[in-house]
Image: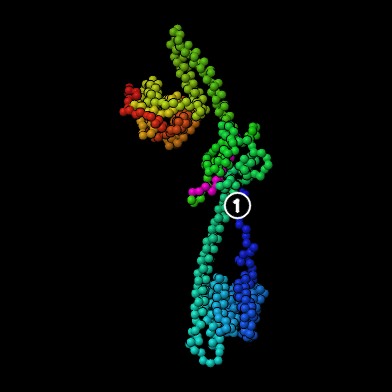
Amino acid sequence: MDTLVARPPLAPWQFHDLSLRGRVVVSQMPQAVTTVLLFLVLAVFQAPLLADPLVLGAGGLTVALTMACALVPWDRLPDRSYLAIPVLDFVPIGLLFEGLFPHVLGVPFLAAIPVLWLVASAQLPRAAVPLGALLTVAMLWMPVLLRPGPVTASALSSPLLIPVMMLAIGTMAQILTNSAEAKDAQLRRLLAAGARRERLLSTVLDSVDVGVLALDETGRPLLTNNGQLHAHAQRRLGHAASSAPDPVLYDGAGAPVPPEASPIARAVAGESFSADLVRVGEPPARQVLSVTARVMRDEHGRAEGSVLSFSDVTELVDALQAQDDFVAGISHELRTPLTSIRGYTELLAMDDRLPDTAQAGLEVIERNADQLLSLVDDLLNAHRDAADLHVVPADLVALLEQATEAAQPHAEHAGITLKAWASDTLVVDGDPVRLRQVLDNLVSNAIKYSSADSTVFVLGTHTDDSAQVQVIDHGHGMSPEGVRRVFEKFYRGADARMSTTPGLGIGLALSKAIVEQHGGSLTCHSSLGEGTVFTLTLPLTSSRAVGPGIAVTAPE
């Protein structure tokens, strides 16, 4: 997986990347540099003070401690051995205080440097602050205790403000250090979690057989599982640095797609879409890609990029096209001889000289030819699309009346009562021929799968904005699996397959497709042994007229 996200440059070095000796030297530098600056200031303004043995001893001891930081192999000594350096730093600070007071004030505040070192080392989390304060007290009291003469309470108490301040400074430093350590630990956890998510994302992207491309808001690629991208798709999506011209792009219907309507352009423009078919290139090397895009948004809802996924479905599309061509061709080939059979049986049936047995045989031939023609029509209709619709204002009540009247002889022959009721007028925008086909199929199925002496109800009702037709039978019913798959092409339940009821399992799939082309829905509710209810819902036209209701077909 390639990641193209820019990263900030790293610093030349980081403190925690240094060796232990390097960290000790860097930690001693503030003390050493401050002492050097103090000596330079004294040399310019108060040179005689440099002759004091205490001041000279303080400078020499500071140099010695600094050299020890650089020369001692601290990593070979026991842990925390280097803390001897900040502890010993109190000695030269005390010598400077004793040698320069009262000519130079503020020298004791240099003790803040080793106190901060002790705290920042995090090696003495509880003892660093009190130790720093005690060392400051010792630094201030030692000269008093070593001087000849009596030790007074005033002499011991006068410098106590300084250790109190060191205690406050150390405490504040300890709080900040603990906070920094907590944030550092949290940051490490977040970084570890982020690294794990990145590894997971990389593994997932490299394991799926789908091309994935993430873009920023300008269309610049951010991330891709490059191994899944095909050459044409890479150039088309602007990911490959190639001088080759972009392949010609066509939509699912074969019309050329302008650059501003390409998947990458639509995604950058903030459009989301699913499973759009895009044909890339020219035959015979043309590819068919199924492309999906989703917009990425920040916490404020602003678009900050998009993600496209696409897969090569060329073989699938070719196979479906070959299947459609085969079924359509076979259906047309079957329709021609069946039409001839149907026509000649009608001619023969008109001959009054035929015996009754021959007439009965012709009726069987005619009935089965009609059944085969119906199946062939279903196969042909299954390959039509929305472009075949001829939409006009259509009254569902009139279509219901036609469907129930046409199904009445079938119901009487099966010993089934057909009852229907509908509102006075239910006007929808649709193709009357295709909607009548749906109603015929629903009513015919209800009769076909109902038991003798039962009743099939057909109800036409409405809500504020939609018309609804329910076809209710009390037949065999279906299992939950059958209800879930009832609208699949060529699916027939186990009971239907074992019965003598003819069918290919196309009618309901075709009916659902027709209803959805009209912007409606077709649902099924059924229970084994209790019957089935099919509900057809279509949007009413804005100029609908709904009356009190009429009985479409009188009960037998």
Q: Give the number of callouts.
A: 1
Residue at horizontal 62 percent and vertical 84 percent from the top: 49
In the image, is 76 to the left or to the right of 176? right
- The color scheme shown is rainbow
Q: Residue at point 45% right, 10% down?
A: 350
Identify the residue shown where x is 64% and y is 68%.
19
* Residue 296 location (% of width, % of height): 52, 47
**Disc 1: which residue:** 5
Q: In which quarter of the image is the C terminus?
A: top left
Q: Where is residue 14 in the image (x, y as percent from the top left)?
A: 62, 64
Asked if residue 24 can be seen in this view, the reply is: no
Badge 1: residue crowd in 10 Å (few <14, some 14–19, many ≥20): few
Q: In the rendering, at what x and y percent does residue 205 appear?
A: 58, 47
When the figure is inspected, residue 442 is found, relative to residue 352, above or below; the finding is below
Q: Nearer the viewer, residue 301 or 174?
A: 301
In the foreground, 338 or 234: 234
Q: Magenta part mainly helix, strand or loop?
A: strand
Q: Residue at x 64, y 74 (%)?
A: 69
Relative to 529, 219 lies left or right: right
What is the residue that sits farthest to the front in this orientation? 45
Which residue is situated farthest in the right direction here?
Answer: 243
Secondary structure found at label 1: loop
Farthest left residue in view: 548
Residue lying furthest bottom:
149
Q: In this view, does 165 lie above or below 301?
A: below
Q: Which range of residues does the magenta coloring cover? A: 301-315
User: Which residue type carries mark 1?
Assistant: Val
Classify residue 157 as left or right of residue 471.
right
Q: Is residue 49 left or right of residue 480?
A: right
